[in-house]
Structures are given as C-alpha cells and as structure tokens.
Image (cartoon, helix red, strand yellow):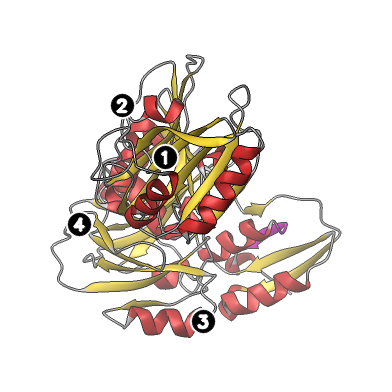
Amino acid sequence: MILDQLATRGNVAQFVGFRPDGGEPKQSYSRIRGHEPNERFLSTLEALETLLASSADRMINIRSYLPSDPRSREFVYGLTDASEALATLLRLTGEGLHTIANETVDISDGGVSGVLQGRILEFAPDDTPRCVEKPGVASMSFELGMSLLEAVYGFRPDIEAVAGERTEFSIHPRPRGWKGSHTLLWEHENAPDQEVSAEPRWPNRFSRHIGDKAFGLLVASLTGAPVPETLVISRKVAPFRFGKPTGDCEIWTRTCPTEQQPGLFTTVKGWTDPYALLALEDPDGDRIASVIVQSAIRAAHSGAAITSAGGDIVIEGVNGEGDRFMLGERAGGSLPEAVLRDVKALNRRLRSALGPVRFEWVHDGARAWCVQLHVGTSVSDGDVLVPGDVLDWTEFDASNGLSALRELIARMGDGQGILVKGDVGLTSHVADLLRKAGIASRISRKAAFTR
C-alpha cells in the first residue's frame, strides 16, 4: 500500500486501510499516533473509533478505490460518528471496493499544500497539493521556499529536495498525523529530472495570504538585502518577525493589502492598535491581509527605484522622509553620489536573486534599506508612464492627490489617456497607480506646462 510505504519516509495523515474479504472489510495497514505501525484492532468499529479519537478535529474521511485505479471511486468527507463511518465503509466494501479511513485535515488552518519536484517548490494556502494545477501558485527555488516557509511558520518543513523525485505535501500550524509533526506527506513518486528554475512572482495566492508588502519584504530579506526589523500581524497566520534592527527605537505601523494598492490604506508613524485599524479600514476582512510594525530608519534620503522599459535602473528620491514624494506631493531632487551608489548596489543584490525589480528605499547615511519590493520590468520610460494609443488626453494635476486620481481612472474610457501635471516621479505612487490600472499616461512637468 502506498501510504504504508510513504510512512517510512516521513509523517502521514493517520489512517486505517481495509480490503474486501468475503464482502466484509479486513484491515490491512494502519498508522495511528500512539499505536504500533499496522497494529491490528479487534474490530473495524474499534479501528474507526480509535482513529476518530486521535484525530485533531475529531473527524475522518473514507476514500474508496480499486487497486488498478487508486483515484477511482467515492470519497466521503468529514464524518464525526464512528457508527456512521462504519456504515459507509460497509456499503463501499459491499461494492467490492478497497477503502482508507483517514483523519480529516483542515486545508484552511493557515498552512499550505504543495509539491516539491527536484529543486522547485510550489504551494498555496486553502487547498490540497493539487493546487499546483491551478493559477496563482507560489513557485520558487527549494532553498528560497523553505526559508520563506520557515520564517512564516517558525519551523522548517520536513521535506528534502532530491533530483528525479516528486513529493506532494502539506504543512500545518498545529501538529498533525501519525508522528504529530507539522508536515504531512501525501504522495511520493519518481519524476523526470529536469533542469528548470523558478523566480518568485507575486501577487500569488500565498502573497495574498500574508499580504503583498509583507511577502515582498520577506523575500528581500531572504536574499540578504537590508530590511528593517518587521513584525507581521496577520489575519491568517500567527505573528512572525524578520529583518534587522535599524538602530532607531521609533516604529511605523503599515497596513498590508492582499495586493498592492498604492497609497490607499493607512500608514502611521508610531504605534496604533492594529486590530482597530483592520476593523476600520477592512471590516469585511478581504482587502487587508495583515498589519506590519516596522522599525523606523533615520532617513537621510528616501525614494524608489524601478527597472525602466529600456532595462535601465531609474533612481529617484528626496532628502529626509519620502512619504510626500511617493504621494506625488513633493518633487524629487538630486541625490548624493554615495546614496546613488548604495541604491545601485541594493538593486544588483535584488536583481541577481529575482531578476528585474522595483523597490522603495531609505538611506540612513550609512546604508540603503529596502522598505518595499516588487518584481518585474516597468512599462515606464522617460516621461511616458504607460504607453498606449490615445485619441483624447485628460489633464490631471498631481496636487489633487491619489483619491482624485482613482476617481478619474474609474471614469476613463477606451482611447483616453491621462496627462499628469506636476513634477511626479516614475517611481511615485501616482505612477504605480496608473501602471496598475493600465491607463495610457504621460507626465507634463510643471515647468513646461501651459494651458
């Protein structure tokens, strides 16, 4: 039996297997915590009662199959009564089917399921390992994926990368399975040994799970980039920390949407009640995944950097804190050569691990810190924020703010573009918002703007 063999490699969900014998179920293999491997029970009912009592959620499933087709037949989920489970098992056995009773494992407990093949790790929350057949799965190298999961959950998943092997797994905040650990194995098989690589891309289902900003910063930290010490207070997983002390005792409290929403939700310098903030700004719980509390940086200079459509790095910034610059309320200025050198070095580090990137940075006079990260080449270049064929341009004064820009974007029709009036940067939230909306747009600098 596959589960019996899989249990020799690691932890498996608790189970008891049965085969038909003269129309009655006869026990074959079993793994129940606190009992010997393949321990024989006095009766089928005793086996089911023991399995139910040992299950963390006091629920079991029954799967039926034929040896020639292990995925062929009925699957009964979430049984809580041993007598009902016995009746189901007897019915299926009477049809000549083999059966497996196993503990119900909640796929929405905050953990993830996925597949490790060779040195590529793919996973998603709220799903089975078959999530890899759906869009939005998180995909990355084994080394990065394992470090990321360990940082979020506080333990290293019990799986190993072996060329030519494929393993289906799930990890759980609460101990599960026969061995009472946090990792369950569901299937293991030989697979083609292919030389493939995976660079993380987000948004994906896991980045939405912990929040876009938290995911990007965690990835940046795992590449070795300087990231301020960050506490993530999430809706879906227990609080976790990463990053490095900045030497400043002050903090920022930042909302962390499921996907990037430039300048939409609250950022506060200092402490504020994160739960009150979540209740106020996202009462339905579907837009903000977490709140992050981040060590402040004594900002000598702040700004952002993107990889332009032409492949060049564009660095923009101001003296001091950069919040008004990012909102398009303050024009960028010239930056010292030492600051530009350090931001370029930060870009090289991130790019070598992730490919082209765009990020926000703060320089404290000694180093450049990464305070937000996304991957990919920007469509912007020069004064063109978003290229496109335009029949009619609508002017927008950047001093009117992001809320007014969002309202304008919602009114735009086909063939219309936005001409942004103001000294806004290619890296500002104004530019981010237009790129996210895909609205053809250009910058008209104040010095050159005339009615």
Callout 2: few (<14), some (14-19), or many (20+) C-alpha neighbours within 10 Å? few
x%, y% of residue 354?
42, 37
Q: Quadrant of the C terminus?
A: bottom right
* Residue 273 visible here: yes
Compare marks 2 and 1 and give the one earlier in the sequence.
Answer: 2
Q: Which residue is rendered at x = 38% and y = 28% of the image?
A: 4
Q: Secondary structure at mark 4?
A: loop
Callout 4: few (<14), some (14-19), or many (20+) C-alpha neighbours within 10 Å? few
Q: Which residue is mark 4?
A: 365
Q: Which residue is mark 1?
A: 16
> Considering only vertical position in the picture, is 120 above or below 416?
above
Left or right, 52 with respect to 282, comes to: left
Compare marks 3 and 2 and give the one earlier in the sequence.
Answer: 2
Q: Which residue is rendered at x = 44% and y = 63% of the image?
A: 332
Badge 4 amino acid = Gly
Marks 3/1: CA–CA distance: 43 Å
Q: Which mark is residue 283?
A: 3
Q: Secondary structure at mark 3?
A: loop
Task: Give the magenta part as a residue range.
Answer: 439-444
Q: Which residue is mark 2?
A: 8
